[in-house]
Image (cartoon, rainbow, N blue to C red):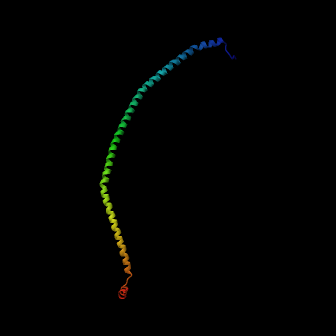
Amino acid sequence: MPTSLSWSEVTAIENRFAGEKHAAQSEKTRLESQLSGQAAAVRQKYAAVRQVISDEERNLRNGTAAGIRRVQSEHDSEVASLDRQIVETRQQSAAEVNDLSEKIRVAQKKVFALQWQCTKQTEQKRKFASLRFRDYLKSVIWGS
């Protein structure tokens, strides 16, 4: 088995397949060109679609942002209104709360005084409960 070819044999083989090689390279070039054209067409087609989607997204974002600002401004006015109502209610009720607090303080003083008198009378009752009529006569008669 030969391990090398002569120059003439190599040239003959190359000449025999040169046409097929040239045809394959031409086909490859044509297909690459066709692929590039199709890729450009797809990119161009979807670039327009992408632009439409980007415009829609921008419009939706702007609309949403405007809605959020509107809701926040409505909310802010409601919060401010509620804050004013709270302040007014506190001012109106402050006098009543102070009056009720004073009444409670006076009532507590009266209850304390009544408890003190009740305790004092209970103590006096206890002292006189042990006294008998006989003891009273002795103290009157003997003056002790």
* 87 shown above or below 32: below
Q: Position of residue 115 (x, y in %)?
A: 36, 70
* Residue at image location 40% in from the left, 30% down from the top: 54
Figure quadrant of residue 130: bottom left
Q: Position of residue 127 (x, y in %)?
A: 38, 79
Figure quadrant of residue 53: top left
Q: Position of residue 27 (x, y in %)?
A: 52, 17
Work out which quarter of the rendered image holds the C terminus and state it.
bottom left
Q: Nearer the viewer, residue 97 or 72?
A: 97
Instruction: Farthest residue to the top: give it.
Output: 8
Figure quadrant of residue 103: bottom left
Q: Nearer the viewer, residue 82 or 133?
A: 133
**How many discs mark residues in the rendered view?**
0
Instruction: Farthest residue to the right: give it.
Output: 1
* 103 shown above or below 90: below
* 124 shown above or below 22: below
* 67 shown above or below 42: below
* Residue at image location 35% in from the left, 39% down from the top: 69
* Residue at image location 34% in from the left, 70% down from the top: 114
Work out which quarter of the rendered image holds the N terminus and state it.
top right
Q: Nearer the viewer, residue 42 or 95?
A: 95
* Residue at image location 36% in from the left, 74% down from the top: 120
Instruction: Farthest residue to the bottom: give it.
Output: 141
Instruction: Farthest residue to the front: give it.
Output: 143
Q: Position of residue 40 (x, y in %)?
A: 46, 23
